[in-house]
Amino acid sequence: MADPGWPGCAKGLKGVLLDLCGVLYDSGEGDGVAIPGSVEALKKLKTSDLKLRFCTNESQAARETFVAKLQRLAFDVSVSEVFSPAPAAVAALKDRRLRPHLLVCDGLLPEFDSVDKTNPNCVVIGDAAEKFSYQNLNEAFRVLLELEKPVLFALGQGKYYKEIDGLKLDVGVYMKALEYACDVKAEVFGKPSPVFFQSALSDMGLQPHEVLMIGDDLVNDVGGAQRCGIKGVQVRTGKYRPSDERHPTVMADGTVDNLAQAVDMILNHRH
Amino acid sequence: MAGRRALKAVLIDLSGTLHIEDSAVPGAQDALNRLRQASVAVKFVTNTTKESKRNLLERLHGLDFNVQEKEIFTSLNAARSLLEQKQHRPLLLVEDSALEDFTGIDTSEPNAVVVGLAPDHFSYQTLNKAFRMILDGAPLIAIHKARYYKRKDGLALGPGPFVTGLEYAADCKSTVVGKPEETFFTQALSDMGCSPDEAVMIGDDARDDVGGAQNAGMLGILVRTGKYRKGDEHKIRPPPHLTCDSFPDAVEHILKNLL
């Protein structure tokens, strides 16, 4: 059977994966702001027969916190629908008996409450934002240098994201800095790691070809999904830049103005 | 070795080669004086991100080295040359102590980013500012890309990790101006009226001093002082022209064999 492509593929879809920041809302002071049309679009998706999960690389706040923020912005989202890097990293830490030195925002710390952090034997780096000082990065660097086999976990590998007042450096930049300094390769949790997408798929009980990912990050959302056999559509909101449409290695299955347009196209093709 | 070259210039590294912190390498002052009596030009070349020429000169004079300011060429000076040549107005992420080497450079409405080692300036906010400029097309200039350096309280991150992070963020490649870049060595030789095959470099860093110089067409002499570790001479290809115990031995070799 010929691949129907986007938006023809909407007919056979059984589920949708949504990125949060840059698709539902733009972050910034306070709760940030909802992207116009996204609250309505999410409602429409939720009342359709499509399964829905949220795949976010949010690593500044614990799930409870950012889900509450989304609810205040009038989005219908619950914690159980959200896949984020920190819980995935916590599972790996426990599995491998690793004790992390954490370079993350204070808001994310509750996710690591159940993890032994004494006498660290690995470093976990998240989007620490203002906490990415020279001093803090140096501390993480020294922990890694003292380890016989340095282990670095990164909660995502994004280059930058958009806040209301402009683009901001993301965790990937500092991950690269530590990789270079210590000659290590980080293990990435969250998008674009295939394991991360797989965990959302198996939670929905769906196959890759039955699912569509919608995000604003061409490489991590769209490219990451595509590597798992999931179609990826990019929205022209959030961190989108026109040059994304001429990217040398990743080509989205479709590019739409915003989530509202994506949802309308999907639902129209199903009727 | 191929036929003798008519040696015209000797480039000499500072820290680790002439002195280790605040002590001169034994015999180095006399050796430098002997070299000066021969008919070769001498220049002192170093990768520094925080010390101005004046700072370096003061330390060398304090250790009784016969050195003049115009004979010093640093990675900061190389950055300045590049800025002047391209007429860039830089955002300077360098320590305040290095700023005097950029006196007179227009830094208003910056359109280039220069990254040295500036722990005080490597805040999230400043790096964001630098990142946004680079994304808008400003070139990224790295004084050098060292991974880390030694501080009194232990090892600390060098400029390299931050340059690498910015390269990743903005999908760009930095222009590195310090050792071991070929342009650094050719710039150092440019006012001495000689070509790389008429020059020799003496240093304690196999990769940055010796490898870099030889890659630029010069001879390289590795000294077993400073940061030298056993086996360093095997880490570069081609191997050093000569590996010897310390700077005075290097000078003896030059006087006996290269002139």
Image (spheres, coloured by chain):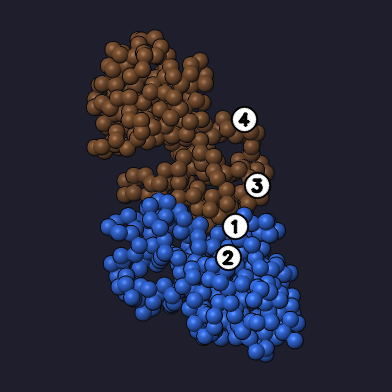
Chain colours: A blue, B brown
Residue at the spot of label 4: B85
Kind of element beneath mark 4:
helix
Looking at the rendered structure, whether the residues under marks 3 and 1 are on a common chain is answered as no
Is the residue marked by circle 4 packed among few (<14), some (14-19), or many (20+) residues within 10 Å? few
Residue at the spot of label 1: A249
Q: CA distance from mark 3 to mark 1?
A: 21 Å
Q: CA distance from mark 2 to mark 1?
A: 9 Å
Q: CA distance from mark 4 to mark 2?
A: 40 Å
State left or right for residue B87 relative to residue B177: right
**Residue displayed at 34% across by 49% down:** B155
Looking at the rendered structure, whether the residues under marks 3 and 4 are on a common chain is answered as yes
Q: Amino acid at mark 4?
A: Gln
Looking at the rendered structure, whether the residues under marks 2 and 3 are on a common chain is answered as no
Q: Amino acid at mark 1?
A: Thr
Kind of element beneath mark 2:
helix
Picture coordinates of residue B34, whole percent (x, y): 31, 13
Picture coordinates of residue A165, whole percent (x, y): 66, 62
Q: Nearer the viewer, mark 2 or mark 3?
A: 2
Q: Check the image and report above or below for B138 versus B55.
A: below
Residue at the spot of label 2: A223
**Residue displayed at 34% across by 64% down:** A122
